């Protein structure tokens, strides 16, 4: 199939028009983590058959696009971010034909399809990694990955002291074809995720083929996993890990001893060349394929990923790591709207995803960030005050996010107000980040990946007929889609109402700030659509106008209480 226009019969709203090349600029994007969404064949792992039963749910929710986390063949060492084959589907998840059906059914509702591209590393089960092991040191096959000789008399020491981002050494030694211990390969994540050598033109070409493969199947765009990691400088002498770690742009902390773009492992300048090649592929489609970078980089570097010559949009995770605080929100919003405009893109807003503690739980405990996994482990099911505080703030933050110019990314289950699931420790944990540190069990990311509750009762709360790959807690049924669909005051009803209103009022990408005091975040869009959030403890007076949404569900009153957002139109 040649690159073509997506055959989308439905022209719906600004974002939903099939030919609109700007559909992504202010889209509401729903992230599906396939293994935890819906299980159609009863094996306990979510799959495409399950997704196909939920198309109406997605359409009724009112999102503009769906982003699928990886569904490729995988040993699931890192939840599918360890890819065996970039141009196929894991048999546990489904088939290419089922994926075609998903694309066509979502498109028939005017919903775009975005998929995850994991380009920093493959899995150690990828055909090219097997070839590399078989071919031996110095071969062209090894040059697709980052193999190096070890130190010491017999090469028994790793080439340097670099650490994996999941903990433990970043180098693993292989056994050579003749059975002797041999070279070492670099992996920024788990041992089973060898890093590609992006200096190798063959690797670059192969990824272009992958992008076209999915573009030709009708996919509308890509979410680019750890987009800041692909290019690396492995020239010697190697810096120590202490040097590298102090300059890590990954979580925005630390002062880099390296000039911008010069860190050996992250955010290197030559990434621009790589993404310019991707851009050529994207622009061969009409409308062009879309991409959003997962780039944990300093804000002033984000434009390198977000520019129209590069991937086109980049995540900012600033709200996700911010405390519940009006000044912090105002500063983040202002800075990011400006940065996105300078980059020629639009801003992105994220409160939850598959890597962080769900925001309904994060906001229950003041001062915790999305990356603070331990914090999500508090037993919210038994602490009703904390739970209610978290949910009120979560809805207020969501309404604020949905009123901002740019794209909002919604993680499956947040529309149900799901808290983080606590207590998934050692024996049931699946995430490589779950670990024991100094004798203490540290929760990983499983708590936000527990399979969704669809029904109040019944096996696995409607997720599956027979099993669930992560344990679901007893209290899950109360958060099920069935219960919340029938309740006008539920979180799900709020998301549906907010997404419908957002579509109705969506306008250009400007905001004008309103001064309503230090505890308020208040802004107006050009057409008068006004959003006011109360971060304080006292009631806050609303500006004049017609109130179309209040997250406290209260009747039309002139003030909003603590932890509430209201939308007002002229
Ligand atoms: C990204 C993904 C995360 C994964 C990592 C390695 O950060 O979001 O889930 O573990 O990349 O691929």
Image (cartoon, grey):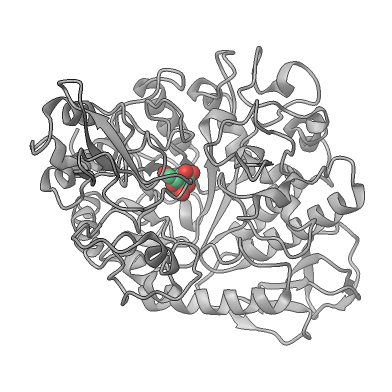
Establish if 407 lies above or below 492. Answer: below
In the image, residue 559 lies at what x, y percent?
89, 74
Establish if 548 lies above or below 130. Answer: below
Residue 360 makes an appearance in the image: no
In the image, residue 49 lies at what x, y percent?
51, 20
Residue at (46% x, 22% y) in the render: 93
Judge by depth and name the residue closer to the eye, 510 or 120: 120
| Residue 276 found in image quarter | bottom left
Q: How many marks?
A: 0
Quarter in which the N terminus is drawn: top left
Ligand 1 visible in quadrant:
top left
In the figure, is residue 254 to the left or right of 489? Answer: left
Residue 537 makes an appearance in the image: yes
Establish if 24 lies above or below 299. Answer: above
Establish if 336 lies above or below 357. Answer: below
Judge by depth and name the residue closer to the eye, 249 or 293: 249
Residue at (60% x, 83% y) in the render: 512
In the image, residue 210 lies at what x, y percent?
24, 38
| Residue 232 found in image quarter | bottom left
Residue at (47% x, 60% y) in the render: 315
Name the residue furthest left: 139
In the figure, is residue 95 to the left or right of 528? Answer: left
In the image, residue 308 lies at what x, y percent?
30, 66
| Residue 86 found in image quarter | top left
Residue at (66% x, 39% y) in the render: 447
In the figure, is residue 431 to the left or right of 238? Answer: right
Name the residue furthest front: 153
């Amino acid at each position: 199939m040649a690159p073509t226009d997506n055959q989308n019969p439905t022209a719906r709203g600004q974002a939903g028009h099939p030919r609109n090349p700007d559909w992504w600029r202010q889209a509401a994007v729903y992230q599906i983590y396939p293994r935890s969404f819906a299980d159609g064949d009863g094996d306990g792992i979510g799959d495409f058959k399950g997704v196909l039963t939920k198309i109406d749910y997605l359409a009724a929710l009112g999102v503009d696009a769906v982003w699928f986390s990886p569904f490729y063949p995988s040993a699931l060492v890192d939840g599918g971010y360890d890819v065996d084959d970039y141009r196929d589907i894991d048999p546990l998840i489904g088939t290419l034909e089922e994926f075609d059906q998903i694309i066509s059914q979502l498109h028939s509702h005017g919903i775009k399809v975005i998929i995850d591209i994991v380009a920093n590393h493959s899995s150690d089960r990828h055909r090219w990694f097997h070839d590399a092991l078989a071919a031996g040191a110095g071969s062209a096959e090894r040059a697709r990955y980052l193999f190096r000789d070890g130190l010491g008399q017999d090469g028994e020491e790793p080439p340097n002291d670099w650490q994996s981002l999941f903990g433990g050494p970043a180098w693993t030694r292989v056994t050579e074809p003749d059975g002797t211990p041999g070279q070492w390969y670099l992996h920024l994540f788990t041992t089973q995720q060898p890093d590609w050598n992006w200096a190798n033109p063959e690797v670059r070409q192969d990824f272009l083929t992958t992008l076209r493969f999915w573009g030709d199947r009708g996919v509308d765009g890509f979410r680019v996993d750890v987009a800041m990691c692909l290019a690396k400088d492995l020239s010697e002498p190697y810096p120590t890990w202490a040097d590298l770690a102090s300059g890590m742009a990954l979580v925005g902390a630390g002062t880099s001893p390296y000039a911008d773009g010069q860190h050996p492992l992250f955010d290197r300048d030559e990434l621009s060349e790589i993404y310019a090649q991707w851009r050529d592929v994207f622009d061969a489609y009409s409308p062009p394929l879309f991409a959003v970078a997962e780039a944990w980089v300093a804000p002033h570097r984000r434009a390198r990923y977000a520019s129209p010559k590069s991937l086109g949009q980049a995540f900012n995770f600033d709200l996700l790591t911010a405390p519940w605080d009006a000044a912090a929100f105002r500063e983040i919003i202002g800075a990011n709207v400006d940065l996105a405009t300078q980059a020629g893109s639009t801003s992105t807003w994220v409160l939850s995803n598959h890597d962080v503690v769900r925001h309904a739980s994060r906001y229950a405990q003041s001062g915790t960030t999305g990356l603070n996994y331990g914090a999500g482990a508090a037993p919210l099911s038994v602490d009703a005050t904390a739970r209610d505080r978290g949910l009120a703030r979560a809805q207020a933050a969501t309404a604020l996010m949905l009123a901002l110019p740019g794209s909002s990314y919604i993680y499956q289950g947040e529309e149900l107000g799901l808290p983080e699931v606590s207590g998934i420790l050692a024996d049931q944990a699946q995430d490589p980040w779950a670990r024991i540190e100094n004798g203490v069990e540290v929760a990983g990311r499983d708590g936000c990946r527990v399979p969704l509750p669809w029904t109040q009762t019944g096996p696995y709360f409607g997720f599956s007929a027979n099993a669930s790959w992560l344990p679901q807690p007893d209290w899950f049924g109360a958060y099920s889609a069935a219960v919340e669909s029938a309740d006008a005051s539920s979180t799900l009803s709020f998301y549906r109402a907010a997404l419908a209103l957002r579509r109705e009022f969506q306008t250009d990408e400007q905001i004008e700030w309103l001064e309503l005091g230090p505890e308020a975040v208040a802004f107006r869009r050009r057409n008068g659509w006004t959003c006011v959030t109360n971060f304080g403890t006292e009631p806050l007076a609303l500006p004049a106008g017609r109130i179309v949404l209040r997250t406290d569900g209260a009747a039309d009153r002139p003030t909003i209480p603590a932890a509430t957002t209201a939308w007002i139109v002229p």
